[in-house]
Image: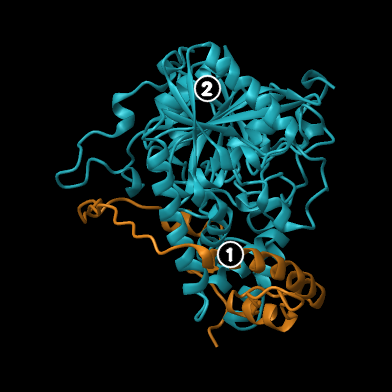
Amino acid sequence: MSADDAPADDLNIFLSRDTVAGDDDGPLAGKTVAVKDNISTKGIPTTCGSAMLEGYVPPYDATVVERVREAGATVVGKTNMDEFGMGGTTETSAYGPTKNPVDPERVPGGSSGGSAAAVAAGEADLALGSDTGGSVRNPAAFCGVVGIKPTYGLVSRYGLVAYANSLEQIGPLANTVEDAAALLDAIAGPDEHDATTRYDAAEDGPAVHPADETTYAAAADGDADGMTVGVPTELVAGADDAVVAVFEDALADLEAQGVETVEVSLPSVEHAVQAYYVIAMSEASSNLARFDGVRYGVDGGEGNWNESFARSREQGFGDEVKRRVLLGTYALSAGYHDKYYKKAQDARAWVKQDFDEALAEADVLATPTMPVLPPKRGESLDDPLSLYLMDANTVPVNLANLPAISVPAGEAEGLPVGMQFVGPAFGEEAVVRAGSAVEE
Amino acid sequence: MTTTDEGGDDAGVVDPDEVRHVAELARVDLDDEEAAVFAEQFADVLDYFAALDEVPEVTDDPDLVNVMRADEVRDGLTQEEALANAPDSEAGFFKGPRVS
């Protein structure tokens, strides 16, 4: 089935179709952009794919929404997602799963599955997603589009409903590397509402934010001649044969363009998925404590404070959100904090060190984005651990705060395979350039 | 909700009562069926997390800088905007359940 035959409603791509016109001129004038439903839009419902926030209407815009509008793009709707970003298939949404435009029996990936599907189905030129452990790159790979996870601190998170805020970044999706990079140009930069973007505020720090000196779209020149690409053996070994075959072909194609490939090793990544989930769940248990049914959310009804909260959260949260809030509460509780949370922070520091060392030998690192082809819907929902393991190649990048891109590298069994490039901190130009060379 | 680290037949035993205890700490009501399913799933996940024990101690000392803005009064949301999504409010205040 081609994308043209599958309209957005059948695929369950959008949660709402309100449009917000952009300014008359700007670098994105005439472009349409779909926005993930955990990014606040003033006056337009923002549910995070959760029953908890059904009917919630933000009183302000996220910084990225202001910026795409100022750049001239028109918002064409809010996209379906795994509830609060917790999932990799867009099946945990309280509003039903999104179907993959490439093959509607299969998942579009997640958690930004609606955003990737909107671009793949031609329902929007561009889309915004958020990436906490791969949630932009995973659906980009599964839907055959481009997705960028920026360096932590490049893009403002103001107005992004928090899941695990030490890990997440808002990132662009598009059909081409150049278009994705142009959207990144529009949204990147310092924001006084998000202290992690505040380069100007630090005493003796650089007065200029990395995004202020750079045009990412200009780096999509397809010219990777002379680049060194490191291939981490650990992140190729775990992938399915069909995926590895496409990946190896794309690497050979890059070598023919003058790229040198070298093997690198990241021994710490064996523990990355464990560390990621402990940290993400711990932060989620704290961040989602705000949903108490008083300021917003499902009314917990009569009874004392604790009973009312617990009822609001029973009704408002789906299974995966409950699982993560409970496991996070457990990991932070007295007696277990050192065993889980502290060790996860050690692992995070170790992963950072490993990437620093590997990136001293190469301009970028390359891996398959996802170790598997997009699964059929309903295959893995009852086995949370098997879903977590699908994130093996994406979560290390969030732990290390680094930029990465997923670009379509080819097909296996008629399904898209994504190739991931990881760069040094604020080295978005390098991953954009490498990605554009795969496209050529 | 303790899992044993040694492996073997006892590995990953999680009791539904322990799941309910954590759910109480997190203020999430669960029914019996949910507690039973979660107990089984948590056993697998915690078993997997136990491998973090092999991670060496690693020091990470990033340079810390003060990124706070000056403490100046600015406009925020209006009272009406802040209350717009509340299930219940009264006389310009959020109305919540009784504390005890």
Q: Spatial distance from mark 1 to mark 2, Cα to Cα?
A: 34 Å
Total numbered labels placed on residues in the image: 2
Q: Residue furthest bottom?
A: B100
Q: Residue at x 41, y 22 (%)?
A: A216
Label 2: few (<14), some (14–19) or many (≥20) C-alpha neighbours in 10 Å: many
The amino acid on which the numbered mark 2 sits, given as a three-letter code, is Gly
Evaluate whether residue A377 shows in this view. yes
Instruction: Tell me the residue that label 2 is attached to.
Output: A435
Camera-nearest residue between A315 and B25: B25
The colour applied to the residues of chain B in this rendering is orange
Question: The chain drawn cyan is chain what?
Answer: A
Which percent across, then down, holds residue A99? 78, 36
Which percent across, then down, holds residue A172? 53, 31
Which percent across, then down, holds residue A35? 58, 35
The amino acid on which the numbered mark 1 sits, given as a three-letter code, is Ala
Chain that bears disc 1:
B
Q: Is residue A41 left or right of residue A349?
A: right
Q: Are marks 1 and 2 on the same chain?
A: no
- Under tag 1, what secondary structure? helix
